[in-house]
Image (cartoon, rainbow, N blue to C red):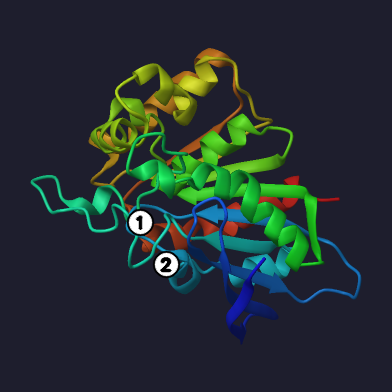
């Protein structure tokens, strides 16, 4: 498989790299970022995946997430993939502007689903990319990665992705956390727009991409951590954190859901609590 190093930089006692490969899942080139802390020869390090939100690439958290010092302290590899396939000839890359805006669908908004509807089904296969192809690539190209110790986290749309992927793969992910996740996409405008376009009109097919629905249907995790800013302007209409709290309480799912006064949806919020999330994952990813 084609694998290319785009850049490497020394940072916080480790190496921050950006890489590109040809994805069989999406049929496009995909970029992703990996931070590897310094380690003894032959050592194996846990792997923490971070899924980004709407409009983002791997670069947003890499440049603003402030995770490297904490990852170096705890000895965690940090992997940040892109949020959708990209390419000059990609079907659906340029979604026409409309009253709702194109930023919440298509390019940069893969919603971590495997699309079944044309034209999206050909390339928009981010579920397969994150669940299968990217972990296999990390295992192959990064010898120090211990794929028996994986965690996953994300922000907004990426928080949605982290929750649903962990709930569907509880044996793979020892830890899961999220910043301001979309917890019930079948009950918000962002989710309804994306899921109807990617998956079609049958709402029953959407449920496997909805964290609250998965918990209601019996999916379980050892525990989960969520931080949500109370001043987040998307909280009431799109994120609906209370629905996750209610679903977890009803199902007996262990969860720490923290409402943070004064914080919004931005990376100022994420970077404030990133080190706490890294430490939380590190505790659960010990050998």
Q: Position of residue 132 (x, y in %)?
A: 64, 46
The residue tagged 2 is 60
Foreground of the two, 150 or 108: 108
CA separation in Å, label 1 and label 2:
12 Å
The residue tagged 1 is 108
Query: Does the rendering let one see residue 83?
Result: yes
> Considering only vertical position in the picture, is 13 above or below 60?
below
> Considering only vertical position in the picture, is 222 above or below 53?
above
Drawn side of residue 252 relative to residue 245, left or right = right
Local secondary structure at mark 1? loop
User: Residue reaching furthest right?
Assistant: 42
Q: From the viewer's perspective, is the residue at label 1 or at label 2 nearer? A: 1
Q: Specify few, some or many for label 1: CA neighbours under 10 Å numbering under 14, 14-19, or 20 or more.
A: many
Q: Which mark is residue 121?
A: none
Tell how many labels: 2
Local secondary structure at mark 2? helix
Q: Specify few, some or many for label 2: CA neighbours under 10 Å numbering under 14, 14-19, or 20 or more.
A: some
Query: Does the rendering let one see residue 75?
Result: no
Q: Residue at 42% x, 22% y: name it.
A: 205
Drawn side of residue 54 relative to residue 270, left or right = left
Q: Residue at 59% x, 16% y: name it.
A: 218
**Which quadrant would the N terminus be assigned to in this image?**
bottom right
Q: Position of residue 174 (x, y in %)?
A: 72, 41
Q: Residue at 77% x, 52% y: name it.
A: 147
Drawn side of residue 265 relative to residue 25, left or right = left
Q: Position of residue 8 (x, y in %)?
A: 61, 83
Q: Residue at 71% x, 49% y: name it.
A: 150
Foreground of the two, 226 or 93: 93
Q: Are discs 1 and 2 less than 8 Å apart at CB?
A: no
Q: Examine the image and state in which quarter residue 186 appears.
A: top left
């Amino acid at each position: 498989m084609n694998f290319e190093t785009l850049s490497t930089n020394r940072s916080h006692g480790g190496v921050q790299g950006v890489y590109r490969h040809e994805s069989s899942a999406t049929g496009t080139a995909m970029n992703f970022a990996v931070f590897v802390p310094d380690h003894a020869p032959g050592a194996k390090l846990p792997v923490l995946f971070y899924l980004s939100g709407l409009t983002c690439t791997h670069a947003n958290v890499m440049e603003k997430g402030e995770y490297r010092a904490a990852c170096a302290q705890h000895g965690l590899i940090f992997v940040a993939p892109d949020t959708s396939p990209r390419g000059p000839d990609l079907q659906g890359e340029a979604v026409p502007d409309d009253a709702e805006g194109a930023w919440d669908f298509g390019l940069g908004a893969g919603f971590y689903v495997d699309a079944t509807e044309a034209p999206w089904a050909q390339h928009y296969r981010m579920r397969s990319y994150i669940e299968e192809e990217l972990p296999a690539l990390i295992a192959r190209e990064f010898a120090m990665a211990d794929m028996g110790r994986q965690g996953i986290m994300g922000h907004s749309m990426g928080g949605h992705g982290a929750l649903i992927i962990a709930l569907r793969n509880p044996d793979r992910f020892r830890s899961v956390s999220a910043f301001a996740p979309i917890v019930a996409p079948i009950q918000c405008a962002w989710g309804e727009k994306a899921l109807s376009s990617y998956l079609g009109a049958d709402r029953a097919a959407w449920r496997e991409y909805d964290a609250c629905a998965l918990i209601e249907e019996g999916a379980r995790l050892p525990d989960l951590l969520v931080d949500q800013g109370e001043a987040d302007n998307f909280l009431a209409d799109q994120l609906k954190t209370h629905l996750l709290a209610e679903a977890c309480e009803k199902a007996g799912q262990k969860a720490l859901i923290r409402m943070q006064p004064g914080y919004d949806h931005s990376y100022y919020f994420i970077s404030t609590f990133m080190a706490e999330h890294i430490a939380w994952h590190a505790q659960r990813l010990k050998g």
